[in-house]
């Protein structure tokens, strides 16, 4: 890995010197795009290398690694009568002197048959989380960096119980975040850019409380945004591109308030979107592909207004979308793989483009998904791991109808889930780390029911 990192740094320096400092210089931009791609490849390679290293260690000790990852509904805070998440059976009564002791280590519970009837599923790069109607949280997929919250770093090929009393679950690239029914916010997983918000850069393999009175949260690539009960927007994590919107490029290791009167927020790869109480959409952060939607490609370190009458928003990998009050879906930003959905594969779309009418839910990362008013699920964009679910590996630059009677869906880099109106759960896409949760590592090109 070191030689690749050195190569990337050297190449970056050469390209930047050759391209100059002009913001309008296409060669400079293409160089930066290439550098970003190299960085992404290195990030993914790091995950793979870690997984290989862990697998080798397990083999050496004769241990098995095959035992038992645009927007979430808001949750209300509970104040002083908070009930903490339950991650293990209650301990026996202790003396007062033991009140500050750490909780006992627990063994995660694996569930193979039947597949839990989740009402909400959230997924990240190679991990997935499921939430039942009674607030039980499960995780499965790649375990590096502690991203599953299971107390270890093992891969899980079937849903594994993590904690209870949870109202909302979201997933970042290699970490997770959950709001408890009492409004407490917990994070776990990778923390190299302070994305856990605990004041450190230490990875965590079990959930750790970092905030109270939270009603909404969104996890991006390496930063997080949360809304408090009074409408305050708090941000933390990586800020090199100004994605925290506080006017700086300084990382924040703890939640930092930067905006008021916010009702929804979406953290993307390197940018952030937020809707205020008047339905105005604001954007800030990286803008290399026009993902801020302001008609140019200039980064913004503070919020800038984009659209009005917005009711829902999602931020992905250099791409954005919004749903307006008339149920119209708008998209902008990166479109190389067709993720804008306008019938073209345009590299950069700097202003909102009308894509589809009659949409009640939509989200995007590298693949976009939309649920229309009639319950039909449509997908488009990057399809190299069959994330679109049409049986092919061909990128789609126009929406493809995949399923009917869908009430909830989620898609990230590599795999997709959908839940229909009967509560049946379907999954498809990449499964090399068990992120589909069916107990195998077999990829699926079309929706397969999880039973």
Image (tube, rainbow, N blue to C red):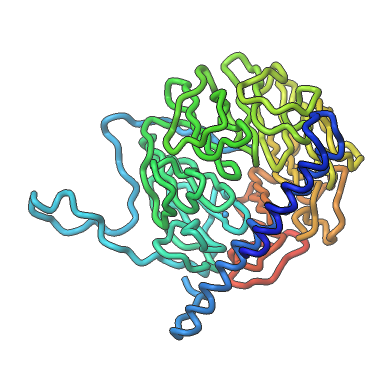
> Residue 234: where, in percent of width, then height?
48, 29
Q: Quadrant of residue 101?
A: bottom left
> Residue 250: where, in percent of width, then height?
52, 33
Image point (60%, 68%), residue name: 49
Farthest right residue?
A: 344
Q: Quadrant of residue 4?
A: bottom right
Farthest top residue?
A: 278
Locate residue 443 relative to residue 202 in the image: left or right.
right
Locate residue 386 relative to residue 96 in the image: left or right.
right
**In front of the other: 104 or 175:** 175
Image point (59%, 37%), residue name: 240
Image point (57%, 26%), residue name: 245
> Residue 303: where, in percent of width, then height?
62, 21
> Residue 383: where, in percent of width, then height?
80, 55
Number of labelled discs? 0
The relative height of residue 144 versus residue 307 in the rendered view (above or below) is below
């Amino acid at each position: 890995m070191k030689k690749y990192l050195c190569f990337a740094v050297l190449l970056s320096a050469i390209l930047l010197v050759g391209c100059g400092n002009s913001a309008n210089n296409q060669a400079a931009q293409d160089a930066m795009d290439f550098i970003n791609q190299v960085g992404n490849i290195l990030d993914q390679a790091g995950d793979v290398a870690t997984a290989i290293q862990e697998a080798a260690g397990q083999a050496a000790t004769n241990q098995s690694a095959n035992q038992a990852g645009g927007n979430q509904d808001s949750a209300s805070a509970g104040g002083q009568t908070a009930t903490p998440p339950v991650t293990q059976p209650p301990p026996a009564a202790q003396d007062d002197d033991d009140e500050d002791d750490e909780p006992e280590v627990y063994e995660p519970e694996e569930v193979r048959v039947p597949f839990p009837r989740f009402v909400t599923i959230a997924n990240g790069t190679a991990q997935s989380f499921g939430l039942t109607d009674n607030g039980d949280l499960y995780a499965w997929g790649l375990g590096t960096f502690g991203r599953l919250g299971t107390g270890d770093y093992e891969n899980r090929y079937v849903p594994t119980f993590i904690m209870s009393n949870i109202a909302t679950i979201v997933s970042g690239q290699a970490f997770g975040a959950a709001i408890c029914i009492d409004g407490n916010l917990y994070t776990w997983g990778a923390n190299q850019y302070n994305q856990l918000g605990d004041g450190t850069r230490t990875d965590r393999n079990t959930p750790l409380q970092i905030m109270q009175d939270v009603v909404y949260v969104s996890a991006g690539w390496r930063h997080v945004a949360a809304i408090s009960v009074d409408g305050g927007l708090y941000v933390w994590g990586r800020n090199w591109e100004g994605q925290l919107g506080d006017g700086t490029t300084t990382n924040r290791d703890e939640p930092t308030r930067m905006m008021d009167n916010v009702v929804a927020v979406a953290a993307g790869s390197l940018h952030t979107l937020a809707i205020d109480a008047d339905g105005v959409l604001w954007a800030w952060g990286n803008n290399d592909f026009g993902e801020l939607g302001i008609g140019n490609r200039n980064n913004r370190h503070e919020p800038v207004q984009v659209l009005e009458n917005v009711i829902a928003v999602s931020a992905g990998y250099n791409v954005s979308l919004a749903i307006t009050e008339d149920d119209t879906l708008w998209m902008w930003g990166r479109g190389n793989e067709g993720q804008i959905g306008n019938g073209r594969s345009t590299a950069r779309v700097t202003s909102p483009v009308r894509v589809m009418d009659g949409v009640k839910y939509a989200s995007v990362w590298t693949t976009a998904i939309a649920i229309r008013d009639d319950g039909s699920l449509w997908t488009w964009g990057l399809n190299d791991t069959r994330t679109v679910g049409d049986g092919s590996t061909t990128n789609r630059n126009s929406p493809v109808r995949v399923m009917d009677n869908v009430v909830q869906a989620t898609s990230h880099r590599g795999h997709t889930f959908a839940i229909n109106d009967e509560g049946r759960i379907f999954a498809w896409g990449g499964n090399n780390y068990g992120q589909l949760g069916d107990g195998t590592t077999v990829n699926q090109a079309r929706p397969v029911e999880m039973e």
